[in-house]
Image: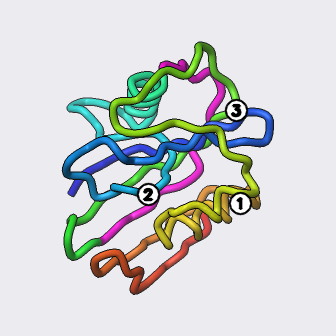
Amino acid sequence: MKNTTLCYIEKDGKYLMLLRNKKAVDENSGKWIGVGGKFEEGESPEDCLLREVFEETGLTLTEYRFRGIVTFVSDEWGTEYMHLFTATGFTGEVCACDEGQLCWIAREDVLSLNIWEGDRIFLKMLLEDRPFFSIKLCYEGEKLVSVDVHPM
C-alpha cells in the first residue's frame, strides 16, 4: 500500500494538468492527471503536497484545500490511498517537469482529456464543489469495475 497526494491547481478558470509521458514505467503513462506524488517518511499529507507540487511545478502553494481521500484498488498496481487537494493560491512560475508535460487546461475541458475513468468521477465532485468525501475505485487493468462513494 502507498500513500500519495494529488492536487488540482486552479488559475483563471483552468487547472494545471500533467500529461504523464516521460517515465519508462508509469501506471499513469499517457494519461492526464493533477500534480503530486508519494509520501516520504514522516510526512503529513500537507507536507507531501507542498513538497511534490514544488518539485513537479516550481510553484509554492499558499492557499489549498484538502478535498477527499481516494482509495485505488488495482489488480496490477496494488492499493493506493490518495489525499486529494485543490489549490487556488501560489507563488512562483511553472517550470519543466521531469515526469511529463504541464499545461493549463480550462476546467470545462478537463473531463474530455485522456484521464482515468475513476478520475472523471472525483473531478466532477470537485467541479461541483462537493464537501469532503471518500471514494473507493477498484480497477482490473485499466477497467473501472466498482465505485463506492462516501460523503462526509
Q: CA separation, marks 2 and 1?
A: 24 Å
Q: CA separation, marks 3 and 1?
A: 16 Å
Q: Nearer the viewer, mark 2 or mark 1?
A: 2
Q: Nearer the viewer, mark 2 or mark 3?
A: 2
Q: Residue 96 at x, y = what percent?
A: 44, 24
Residue marked by disc 3: 88
Between 47 and 10, the one lying in front of the other is 10
Q: Is residue 30 magenta?
A: no
**Farthest-out residue, right:** 12
Relative side of 6 to 9, left or right = left
Residue marked by disc 2: 31
Asked which secondary structure carries label 1, the reply is: loop
| Other residues around mark 1 within 10 Å, as few (<14) / some (14–19) / many (≥20) | some
Q: Residue 119 at x, y = what percent?
A: 52, 64
* Residue range (magenta): 58-73
Disc 2 residue type (three-letter):
Lys
Disc 1 residue type (three-letter):
Arg
